[in-house]
Amino acid sequence: MLQKAVEVKQGDTPEALQRRIMEEAEWKILPEAVRLFCDGRITVENNKVYIKGE
C-alpha cells in the first residue's frame, strides 16, 4: 500500500503541514508509484488500484 500518515502538530499552518506532507510522504511515495507503474505492476479494476505481487 502506498500511503503514509503525517502528524498534524498543534500550531501548524496550512503551509507548514503541506510542506511536511510533501517531505515525509509525497516525495517518497511518488518515485515508488512510478517504478511500480513502469514495471507493469499496477492494475485498475472496478475503479480500484491493485499492485501485483503484494
Image: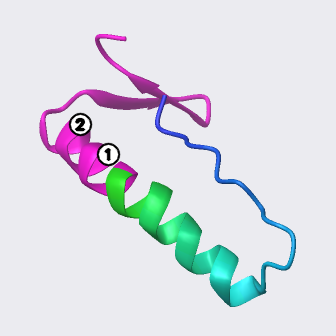
> Which element type, helix, strand or loop, lies under badge 1?
helix
> Which residue is more in the foreground, 19 or 35?
19
Q: Residue at x 24, y 27 (%)?
A: 41
Q: Residue at x 78, y 78 (%)?
A: 12
Circle 1: residue type: Ala
Where residue 14 sits: x, y (%)?
Answer: 75, 85
Where residue 39 sits: x, y (%)?
Answer: 13, 34
Q: Is residue 33 left or right of residue 12?
A: left
Q: Is residue 31 left or right of residue 9?
A: left
Q: Where is mark 1, residue-wise? A: 33
Q: Where is mark 2, residue-wise? A: 36
Quadrant including the C terminus = top left
Q: CA distance from mark 2 to mark 1?
A: 5 Å
Q: Are marks 2 and 1 in contact (CB under 8 Å)?
A: yes
- For the magenta stretch, what is the residue range? 29-54
> Which residue is more in the foreground, 35 or 5?
5
Which picture quadrant has residue 31?
bottom left
